[in-house]
Image (spheres, rainbow, N blue to C red):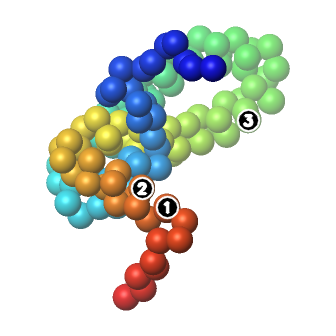
Amino acid sequence: MTNAFRLPRFLDKSLIDVKLGFALMCDRRVQLRTKIFALLLGLGITGLVEFLEIPVEGILAALVPFLGMMGDVVIDGAETIAGPLLLANALMPFLAPRDIVERVRSERATAKKPGAPVVDV
């Protein structure tokens, strides 16, 4: 059975590829300015989400005082650390230059092929 619905060509690759974003963050060919911009954008989005959560967290802290405050501290701390990093990695394929993204994507694809020779330097 053939698939009648085909994705556009630019959507054939996964739309959100955090592993590719991490590879781009570690790649020296991507400018530091792009990496810092991705982190700042991730920090801004996380800050906006934190700001929108304030009313819900206030109600939860009022209903269950001790557990609400402890949960608030734990969850906000995790969001503050992990949120910008995950968002920056998710945004890097869209912010980095397209030729570098395609080059890293092809390098990762050839490295995953089974039976490919392993080059150990």
Q: Please, what secondary structure does the residue beneath circle 3 have?
A: helix
Give x and y (percent) for residue 8: 36, 20
Query: Quick one: label 3 or label 2, which is nearer the N terminus?
Result: 3
> In this orientation, which residue lies closer to the viewer: 103 or 16?
103
Amino acid at pointer 2: Ala
Amino acid at pointer 1: Lys
Name the residue tied to disc 3: 70
Q: Residue at x 22, y 51 (%)?
A: 100
Cα distance between the residues tagged 3 and 2: 44 Å
Name the residue tied to disc 1: 112
Question: Is residue 36 among the parts visible in the rendering?
Answer: no
Q: Which mark is residue 109?
A: 2
Query: Quick one: label 1 or label 3, which is nearer the N terminus?
Result: 3
Q: Residue at x 39, y 47 (%)?
A: 21
The crowd level at tag 2 (other Cα within 10 Å; few <14, some 14-19, many 20+) is few
Q: Are marks 3 and 2 in contact (CB under 8 Å)?
A: no
Give x and y (percent) for residue 96: 23, 44
Amino acid at pointer 3: Met
